[in-house]
Structures are given as structure tokens and as C-alpha cells.
């Protein structure tokens, strides 16, 4: 009970007692009633304020603020994790190169395991960082005029060594006359690489991935196609869902995080583009990215 309500009840009780005793003073009655009405109005306002205070304490935090706070926490945590990971990878590469002396076969195997897992951890930290920044809307975008040829070369530089190590084929086809772009080429290259990497990893012995560019009006079409395991309609429908991974045995054989494709989708959306997918089990997958060109 609020103080105003208690005071109103006390005044009303006095009026009732006076009425019972016949001691009401008519000239004072309007003022007394008005005082009670004012106190009741004030009590109602106090009650609403109290309800709002209780609701605010019970309600979840503002989602935008929460996501930004979360992104800040993860950003700090990831920075702290990257420092030792850089050292681990650096020393692992040094040992693997033979700079510190020859290694026996078992030592080489141990060092290769360290290097593989450190690279995987660095990739995972980057994906977690990008996903949190995308959710919080804090990912920096540095737009500038660029050509798809330059972006495709960035993808090829990263994807070709992976293709060679897996014994797969990676081909880039960039025709002349494609639309000029005004966007962050590094972010687009990162998104494209996610699709290329999936195609290379989730394909068979004669796996092949092709990255090519095309145009439709003033829009750039980026097509990433593979001859891999393909996907069921149910899996296609869940693409972009954070942490989703197909139950296919080939997919499960690779230790993925389920963040690659969601990050790619988020980056392309951030750049103003869209993604469409066509896929069938055992018949490969094609991702088509549409990016608005300069108009």
C-alpha cells in the first residue's frame, strides 16, 4: 500500500465517523472530498510507477545493449586467446620446418597435430568473433571501389593450398566486363571462401569446386559450385542456422563448428547481397551470391 492510499483511507475513515456521529461540517466537506480524490489519484500514479519498476526488473535486458555487451566480452576473450595461439602456431611451424633440428617420425606427427589444431582454433576464434560482431552490429565495413577479379584472387590465394592438400581441384573463372563494385572486398572474399571450403571438404576423391562470376543487369552473380555430397531439402532449409551441421557421415568426419555458413550468410547480408542454394544428395551444391553493382 502506498502512503497516498493510506492517507486517503484515513481521511475517508474520519468522514465516516463524523457522519455516524452527526458532526460533519458542510462547508469543509468539498475540500475533504477533493483531498481524498487527489490522494487516490496520486496513489494510482505511485502504484503504476511501482508496477513499472517491478516489470523492468523482471523483464530481460534490452537486446541491442545485451548483444553489444556480449560482443565486447567475446572480443576481449578472443583477443586474450589469440595471443597464446599465435605463439603455439609460430613455435609449431618453426619445429615443423626443421629450423630447430631434425625430428623423428613420431615427433613430426606430434608437431603436425599441434599445427593442425592451432590453425583450427584460430579459424574457430575468428568465426566466433565475426558472428558476435554481426549479431551486435559492430563489424566494421570498409567500402571502396573494387573489381570481382581482385576478390576472386584473394579467395584463390587461400583456397588453392587447401585444395592441393586435400587432393581436390579448385578453378576460378572471371570473365571480362563484370559490374564494378563498391563494398568491402575482404569481407566478401571471406564469405565466398566459406562456401569454397565446404565444397572442397565435403566432396569425394575427385572433388572439384568452381568459382565463377557472371552479371545480370547491374548485379554481380558469384557462383560457387561443387560435385560433392550435396544436401537434402531439409538440410538446405536449415542453412544459415548457427551451429547446424548435417548428419551426413562425410560432414561429421570433418571437425567443423557449424559457424562457417552462418557467418558467410551474415557477411553477405551486411554487404547488401543475397544467397540462393540449389543442391541434391550425391549431386553437388551450387551457391549463387547476388551483389548489387555500382549504379
Image: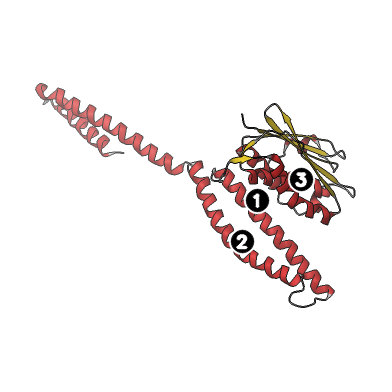
Relative to residue 229, is residue 115 depicted above or below?
A: below
Relative to residue 223, is residue 156 depicted above or below?
A: below
At x 76%, y 54%, the residue is 255
Q: Which mark is residue 127?
A: 1
Q: Which mark is residue 157?
A: none
Q: Residues within 10 Å of mark 3 (few under 14, many from 20)?
A: many
At x 29%, y 38%, the residue is 2
Q: Position of residue 145 (x, y in %)?
A: 61, 39
The quadrant holding residue 97 is: bottom right
Tell me, yes or no, if residue 244 can be seen here. Answer: no
At x 83%, y 76%, the residue is 104
Task: Indicate which label's residue lies in the foreground, 3 or 1.
Answer: 3
Q: Position of residue 254 (x, y in %)?
A: 79, 53
Under circle 1, the secondary element is helix
| CB within 8 Å, label 1 to label 2 | no
Relative to residue 100, is residue 72 depicted above or below?
A: above
User: Label 2, on which residue?
Assistant: 82
User: Label 3, on which residue?
Assistant: 196
Q: Residues within 10 Å of mark 1 (few under 14, many from 20)?
A: many
Q: Name the one closer to the observer, 148 or 288.
A: 148
Q: Position of residue 288 (x, y in %)?
A: 74, 35
Of the two numbered discs 3 and 1 on the same chain, state the one appearing first in sequence.
1
Under circle 3, the secondary element is helix
Q: Name the one closer to the observer, 117 or 40.
A: 117
Tell me, yes or no, if residue 12 can be seen here. Answer: yes
Mark 3 → mark 1, Cα distance in angstroms: 16 Å
The quadrant holding residue 147 is: top right
Please state, as top left, top right, bottom left or bottom right, where the N terminus lies in the image. Answer: top left
Amino acid at each position: 500500500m502506498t502512503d497516498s492510499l493510506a492517507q486517503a483511507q484515513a481521511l475517508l475513515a474520519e468522514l465516516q465517523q463524523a457522519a455516524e456521529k452527526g458532526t460533519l461540517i458542510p462547508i469543509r466537506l468539498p475540500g475533504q472530498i477533493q483531498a481524498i480524490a487527489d490522494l487516490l489519484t496520486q496513489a494510482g500514479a505511485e502504484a503504476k510507477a511501482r508496477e513499472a519498476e517491478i516489470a523492468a526488473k523482471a523483464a530481460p535486458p534490452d537486446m541491442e545493449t545485451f548483444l553489444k555487451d556480449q560482443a565486447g566480452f567475446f572480443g576481449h576473450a578472443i583477443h586474450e586467446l589469440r595471443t597464446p595461439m599465435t605463439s603455439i602456431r609460430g613455435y609449431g611451424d618453426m619445429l615443423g620446418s626443421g629450423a630447430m633440428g631434425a625430428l623423428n617420425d613420431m615427433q613430426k606427427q606430434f608437431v603436425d597435430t599441434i599445427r593442425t589444431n592451432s590453425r583450427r582454433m584460430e579459424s574457430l576464434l575468428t568465426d566466433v568473433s565475426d558472428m558476435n560482431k554481426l549479431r551486435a552490429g559492430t563489424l566494421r565495413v570498409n567500402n571502396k571501389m573494387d573489381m570481382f577479379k581482385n576478390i576472386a584472387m584473394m579467395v584463390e590465394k587461400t583456397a588453392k593450398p587447401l585444395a592441393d592438400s586435400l587432393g581436390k581441384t579448385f578453378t576460378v573463372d572471371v570473365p571480362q566486363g563484370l559490374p564494378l563494385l563498391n563494398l568491402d572486398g575482404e569481407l566478401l572474399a571471406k564469405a565466398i571462401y566459406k562456401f569454397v571450403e565446404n565444397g572442397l571438404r565435403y566432396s569425394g576423391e575427385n572433388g572439384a569446386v568452381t568459382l565463377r562470376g557472371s552479371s545480370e543487369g547491374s548485379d554481380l552473380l558469384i557462383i560457387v559450385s561443387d560435385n560433392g555430397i550435396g544436401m537434402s531439402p531439409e538440410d538446405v532449409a536449415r542453412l544459415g542456422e548457427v551451429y547446424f551441421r548435417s548428419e551426413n557421415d562425410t560432414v561429421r568426419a570433418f571437425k567443423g563448428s557449424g559457424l562457417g555458413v552462418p557467418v558467410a550468410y551474415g557477411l553477405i547480408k551486411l554487404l547488401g547481397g543475397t544467397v540462393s542454394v540449389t543442391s541434391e544428395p550425391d549431386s553437388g551444391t551450387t551457391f549463387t551470391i547476388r551483389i548489387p553493382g555500382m549504379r
